[in-house]
Image (cartoon, rainbow, N blue to C red):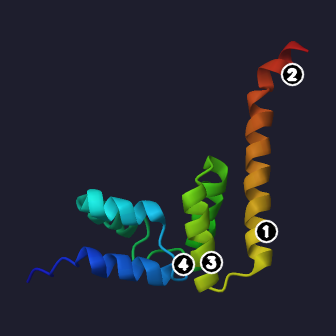
Amino acid sequence: METQKPTIEQILTKMKGSMNGELPNVVKLASEKLPEMLYEQIRSNMFAMPENGALENETRTLIYLGVAIATGGKTCIKAMLNKAKTQNISKDKLIETYKIVRYAESSRILSNAEQLFEEL
């Protein structure tokens, strides 16, 4: 038996509920201009973070937040901070996530300097 595809409004309501009542403006715009993209985004979400996946939801949110910080995705940063509020993720965990991202980025820069250090 085939399950019925959720409506755009149902998807937006669920997303809004998971993000402390705030929906990124780009999601609203895309749902109006290119609704099939919203279905693709949900499909990708379910692929990356299956309902019974190995990681807990809090861990997933912190990973997503870390990647958003590292890549400069302001919309995703805000969305994941809203999600973190909904999940009651502590400030200490958010700060530690930032510290890990900062360390990873500084390690990348160090790695990029290998040739420089070889030439010195």
Disc 1 to disc 2, C-alpha distance: 32 Å
Residue 5, percent across and down? Answer: 18, 76
Q: Which mark is residue 103?
A: none
Classify mark 1: helix, strand or loop. helix
Mark yes or no: residue 44 visible. Answer: no
Classify mark 4: helix, strand or loop. helix
Classify mark 2: helix, strand or loop. helix
Residue 35, quarter of the rendered image: bottom left
Mark yes or no: residue 83 visible. Answer: yes
Q: Which residue is mark 3?
A: 84
Q: Amino acid at mark 3?
A: Ala
| Chain-order first, disc 2 or disc 3 | 3
Q: Which residue is mark 2?
A: 117
In front of the other: 78 or 5: 78
Q: Amino acid at mark 4?
A: Asn
Q: Residues within 10 Å of mark 1 (few under 14, many from 20)?
A: few
Q: Which residue is mark 4?
A: 57
